[in-house]
Image (cartoon, grey):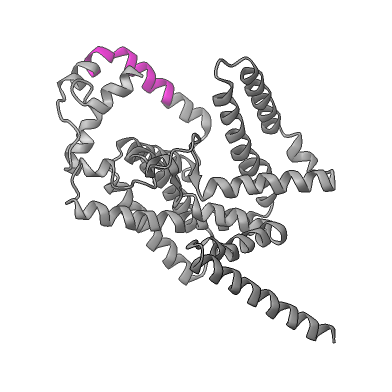
């Protein structure tokens, strides 16, 4: 009897939903009702499977679009859909905290947590004394819904190391979709040097942010190759994704990201060869001393380099040491 009532109730709700949907479409010409399943599905994830929401955010973050970039000016720079989901995580986290009245003591009293508390206190003080309080309040709120989910909530999620791997792979999956979009867009513009600066829009505002993200996850992707006892099928997927990220890194034309990868390779060599820190520090100090000893000769040599940024890969690398005419390098020096 109870089972039959549940079935009848289910069909009544379904018929009611379809009826309301048809009325809104036919009479009001609005389709908002058909977004309800997505909203209800997201709500169920928040209530019953909080970890999956964080994985969903990881996947959607590279695919998120800033409303300002597509012409929607609402007075708040909002990245859709990642930021509303982060706000949802914040809301349910606070609700759960108030209900359970407990949180992991080790996370709550960690030195990094203490620094975060001080940061929020200082932002609050400067918000009170701000000449533009509305702007300051917006900044404070945005910090809260970024930092609390990304640090306090994820800290609990990452207690299980497998969740760290899942989180990284969800982000890489979303990033690869952006890479395909960017590469196709870049190809349609003949892989020109100028188009490399904007073909990733609206997902990233320029090639430096795009290149930085690729550099970070290229290193993490490469690290998965060192995991022991990994299945052959997974290793093939790791190699394929690594190849995609490497190609994207080259096409990004972001020299700073290229330089960071070189630095990471240097660190990796030190780790693999198990070179002691005191030797590394000695080498760094010697290199710094040599630079200051021959700084005039080094600067003179760099000033002779007049190679500007170029679509040619070799010429683009040569332009890294151009401190005379390259606009990007001069901007960094001015900063």
Rendered image quadrant of residue 21: bottom right
* Residue nearest the observer in this picture, 210 or 141: 141
Residue 162 seen from this side? no
Q: Position of residue 227 (x, y in %)?
A: 53, 58
Q: Magenta residues, as a range?
A: 284-298
Above-or-below relation of 297 to 10? above
Q: Position of 300 compared to 61: left or right?
A: left
- Residue shown at 62% from the left, 59% from the top: 42
Residue 144 location, x and y as percent?
63, 35
Foreground pick, 78 / 49: 78
The vertical placement of 172 against 321, above or below, is below
Residue 331 in the image, given as x and y percentages of width and height = 30, 23
Q: Quadrant of the C terminus?
A: top left
Asked if one can make out residue 92 in the rendered structure from this viewpoint, the answer is: yes
- Name the one closer to the observer, 291 or 141: 141
Q: Quadrant of residue 236?
A: bottom left
Residue 28 painted magenta: no
Q: Residue furthest front?
A: 27
* Relative to 285, 142 lies left or right: right
Q: Between 66 and 176, which is closer to the camera in this rendering?
A: 66
- Residue 232 position, x and y percent, is 47, 71
Quarter placement of the N terminus: bottom right
Most frequent secondary structure within the magenta stretch: helix
| 256 to 123, vertically: above or below | below
Image point 62% across, 71% down: which residue?
A: 17
**Is residue 293 highlighted in magenta?**
yes
- Identified at 71% across, 58% down, the residue is 47
């Amino acid at each position: 009897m109870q089972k039959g009532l549940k079935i009848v109730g289910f069909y009544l709700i379904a018929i009611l939903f379809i009826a309301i949907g048809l009325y809104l479409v036919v009479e009001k010409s609005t389709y908002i009702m058909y977004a309800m399943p997505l909203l209800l599905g997201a709500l169920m994830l928040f209530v019953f499977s909080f970890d999956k929401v964080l994985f969903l955010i990881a996947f959607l973050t590279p695919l998120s679009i800033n409303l300002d970039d597509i012409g929607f000016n609402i007075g708040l720079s909002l990245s859709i859909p990642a930021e509303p989901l982060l706000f949802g995580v914040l809301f349910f986290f606070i609700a759960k905290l108030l209900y359970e009245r407990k949180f992991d003591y080790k996370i709550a009293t960690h030195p990094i947590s203490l620094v975060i508390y001080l940061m929020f206190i200082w932002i609050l003080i400067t918000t009170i004394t701000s000449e533009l309080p509305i702007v300051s309040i917006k900044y404070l709120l945005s910090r809260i819904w970024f930092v609390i989910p990304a640090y306090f909530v994820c800290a609990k999620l990452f207690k299980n190391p497998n969740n760290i791997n899942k989180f990284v792979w969800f982000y890489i999956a979303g990033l690869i979709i952006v890479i395909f979009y960017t590469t196709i867009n870049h190809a349609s513009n003949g892989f020109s040097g100028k188009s490399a600066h904007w073909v990733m829009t609206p997902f990233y505002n320029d090639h430096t942010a795009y290149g930085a993200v690729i550099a970070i996850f290229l290193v993490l992707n490469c690290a998965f190759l060192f995991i022991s006892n990994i299945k052959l099928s997974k290793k093939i997927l790791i190699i394929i994704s690594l190849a995609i990220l490497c190609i994207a890194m080259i096409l990004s034309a972001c020299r700073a990201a290229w330089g960071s990868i070189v630095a990471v390779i240097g660190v990796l060599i030190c780790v693999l060869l198990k070179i002691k820190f005191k030797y590394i520090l000695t080498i760094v100090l010697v290199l710094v001393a040599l630079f200051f000893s021959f700084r005039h000769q080094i600067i003179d040599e760099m000033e002779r380099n007049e190679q500007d940024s170029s679509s040619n890969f070799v010429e683009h690398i040569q332009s890294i040491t151009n401190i005379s005419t390259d606009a990007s390098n001069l901007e960094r020096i001015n900063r």
